[in-house]
Image: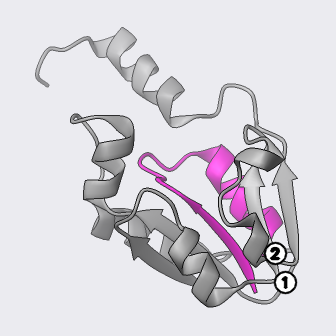
Amino acid sequence: MIFTNGCFDLLHLGHINLFEKAKSMGEVLIVAINSDKSLSCLKGPQRPLSWEKDRAKQLLSLKSVDYVVVFDEQTPKEILSELRPDILVKGGDYKLFEIVGREYVKKVCRFPFIKGKSTTNLINLIVNRYGYKKM
């Protein structure tokens, strides 16, 4: 069982590549996403941009994702302690000591961050192109 987690508020190519690489490591990929409340606490009151049910449905539409779990806590530590997956996958923007729940898995894999592919970059691109005017 392979596990990864994140907000995945605006799905982008970096996320999809991460899921595909993670899925190639085992038979079942579980993606845990922060609930709307959890995401707002982590990223600020203007987030989420996509509601948790929408984010979950988007992820489940990907061939590489088998299951989606929503969690209310700030971290997936509780889920990881219950599931105890074989491999925990994170993006390369995380340092090993920062990865929550690593003690509950057999192996941690980090895949390189794809330069320019981030939710923050997408938000900045939209704001720069369209500003704050209503469409």
Segment colored magenta: 1-23
Instruction: Give me the C-alpha separation between circle 2 and circle 1.
Output: 9 Å
Q: Using residue 46 as the reference point, say whether residue 33 is left or right of it.
A: right
Residue depicted at 11% across the width and 22% down the height: 134
Tag 2 near tag 1, CB within 8 Å: yes
Image disc number at residue 26: 1
Q: Out of 57 and 120, give the one closest to the viewer.
A: 120
**Residue type for callout 1:** Gly
Position in image of residue 34 (x %, y %): 41, 61
Q: Out of 40 and 75, give the one closest to the viewer.
A: 75
Q: Which residue is the site of mark 2?
A: 87
Position in image of residue 69 (x %, y %): 46, 78
> Is the residue 58 above or below the residue 17 in the image?
below
Is residue 11 at all visible to an observer of this figure? yes
Residue depicted at 59% across the width and 88% down the height: 82
Position in image of residue 67 (x %, y %): 55, 84
Q: Is residue 31 magenta?
A: no
